[in-house]
Image: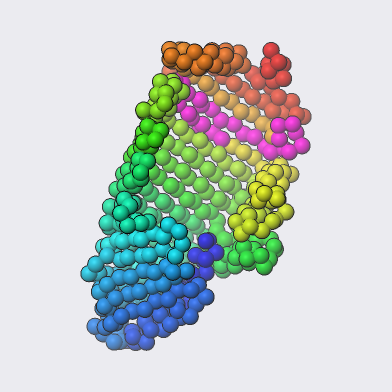
């Protein structure tokens, strides 16, 4: 999928680039026809047709293109159609074309490929503005607003509805032929109905940012990955760090309410944040990877045993799970990506077993050979029954018994409260398990008073480079044998 998107974007940016700018402006009809012809002759199986094209100006710096209909086919039976509409076009002396003021008489209809569960989409395009660049990238600016989005698999089935979807993208050239890029996608008012229940969502956001992008390196990386997917090459990928200085993806979700009628469960999520990033390290052949999972308000009601769910701290909870990997070898990550691609294309790579499963050990061993570090700080998991906080720094070392050395410090609160809540239920087995587990946790931990004055148990774990393991200064083996 990634390779196909890269190929399409490259094709469009090369084939549909405007003619050299001039003070008089281009000849619009031949230019538009050349775009359509180049697109239809591409290797991606895309065909575009424009019915009843009329131009307010045949040549000059600007025109308004009116049409009676648009039809696009793609893949195996996929298509998109739009009725009568118009779009303004403006050419600059620098060779770019700006477009906007889109007007359509009716919705856009998209039919998925001819496969099981074919999807039909309909939506209104309320705004489309942007700038088409004659250089490497497809758009230097894009602003899109879609409303009344509906997706349906079969007639009579309740559709997936989204009230409003907006997207924007900005590309900023910088020195050395590189560029910075940012993109945002926001969906509001999502509603999914299923026979088993459904889900409603107030807002979903996807943000992408990258700095010091090198288009040639990105294109070369995509071509090499495409060759690997087709089985034509197993050569190493170009360095990931050559494509950009850093790249970040942020996923946000707010106001989610989901219901499963079969299990009689209702899940409510107030906020969720997932953030991933990749950046070049101080050494050019090393990368820094980071991941953050953060959320507020998970609630389970009407479950088979709601008392147990609440006692386990699921109603509601807060969590923050950060992880940073420093010193990751660029080549090792690229190798793992190649193996994932080989798995996806059902080809057996060197770290794929006969069942097609990925063996991650070679990747982690490569991290250990160069002393890559795992860092997790400001860890937080909390709920009515208790909380877990702390952090640590570990260096990967596959030759050691635990595979790492370093320090981890955790604090656990609410142990007694959780035990009492579970013992108060009508389930004798749960009460017995709660007693044994809390006794085990209290025996391993060091009791102390937390910042809020409550009793917490502290666990300071030291894993030595010599393979030793100490918990609160005592040998871990001896503690587990007690």
Q: Residue at x 51, y 32 (%)?
A: 378
Instruction: Examine the structure image and report whether residue 302 is included in the region drawn in magenta.
Output: no
Q: Residue at x 52, y 69 (%)?
A: 7
Work out whether residue 377 can be spotted: yes
Kindly indicate the quadrant of the structure image that contains residue 171: bottom left
Q: Give the mark count.
A: 0
- Rendered position, 418 above or below 10: above
Q: Which span of residues is magenta-colored? A: 376-403
- Rendered position, 155 above or below 291: below
Left or right relative to 442: residue 368: right
Q: Residue at x 56, y 19 (%)?
A: 458
- Rendered position, 113 above or below 56: above
Q: Nearer the viewer, residue 403 or 233?
A: 233
Instruction: Examine the structure image and report whether residue 386 is included in the region drawn in magenta.
Output: yes
Kindly indicate the quadrant of the structure image that contains residue 59: bottom left
Q: Position of residue 376 (x, y in %)?
A: 56, 35
């Amino acid at each position: 999928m990634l390779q196909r998107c890269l190929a399409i974007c490259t094709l469009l940016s090369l084939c549909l680039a405007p003619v050299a700018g001039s003070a008089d402006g281009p000849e619009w009809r031949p230019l538009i026809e050349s775009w359509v012809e180049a697109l239809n002759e591409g290797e991606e199986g895309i065909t575009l047709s424009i019915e009843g094209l009329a131009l307010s100006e045949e040549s000059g710096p600007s025109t308004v293109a009116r049409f009676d209909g648009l039809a696009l086919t793609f893949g195996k039976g996929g298509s998109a159609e739009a009725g009568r509409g118009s779009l303004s076009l403006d050419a600059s002396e620098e060779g770019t074309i700006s477009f906007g003021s889109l007007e359509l008489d009716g919705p856009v209809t998209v039919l998925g490929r001819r496969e099981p569960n074919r999807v039909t989409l309909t939506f209104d395009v309320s705004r489309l503005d942007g700038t088409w660049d004659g250089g490497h990238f497809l758009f230097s600016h894009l602003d899109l607003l879609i409303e009344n989005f509906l997706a349906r698999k079969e007639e009579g089935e309740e559709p997936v509805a989204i009230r409003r979807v907006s997207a924007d993208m900005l590309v900023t050239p910088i020195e050395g032929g590189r560029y910075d890029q940012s993109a945002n996608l926001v969906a509001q008012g999502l509603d999914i109905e299923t026979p088993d229940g459904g889900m409603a969502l107030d807002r979903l956001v996807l943000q992408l940012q990258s700095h010091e992008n090198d288009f040639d390196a990105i294109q070369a990386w995509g071509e090499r990955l495409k060759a690997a997917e087709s089985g034509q090459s197993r050569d190493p990928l170009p360095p990931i760090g050559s494509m950009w200085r850093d790249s970040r993806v942020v996923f946000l979700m707010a106001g989610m309410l989901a219901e499963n009628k079969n299990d009689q469960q209702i899940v409510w999520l107030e906020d969720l944040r997932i953030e991933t990033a990749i950046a070049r390290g101080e050494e050019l052949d090393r990368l820094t990877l980071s991941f953050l999972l953060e959320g507020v308000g998970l609630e389970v009601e009407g479950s088979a045993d709601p008392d147990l769910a609440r006692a386990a701290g699921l109603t509601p909870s807060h969590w923050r799970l950060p992880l940073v990997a420093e010193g990751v070898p660029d080549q090792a990550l690229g190798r793992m990506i190649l193996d994932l691609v080989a798995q996806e294309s059902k080809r057996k790579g060197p770290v794929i077993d006969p069942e097609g499963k990925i063996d991650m050990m070679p990747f982690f061993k490569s991290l250990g050979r160069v002393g890559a570090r795992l860092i997790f700080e400001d860890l937080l998991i909390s709920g009515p029954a208790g909380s877990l906080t702390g952090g640590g720094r570990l260096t990967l070392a596959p030759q050691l018994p635990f595979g790492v050395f370093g320090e981890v410090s955790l604090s656990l609160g609410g142990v007694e409260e959780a035990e009492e809540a579970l013992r108060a239920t009508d389930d004798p087995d749960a009460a017995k398990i709660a007693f044994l587990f809390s006794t085990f946790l209290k025996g391993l931990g060091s009791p102390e008073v937390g910042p809020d004055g409550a009793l917490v148990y502290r666990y300071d774990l030291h894993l030595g480079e010599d393979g030793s393991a100490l918990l609160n200064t005592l040998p871990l083996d001896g503690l587990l044998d007690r």
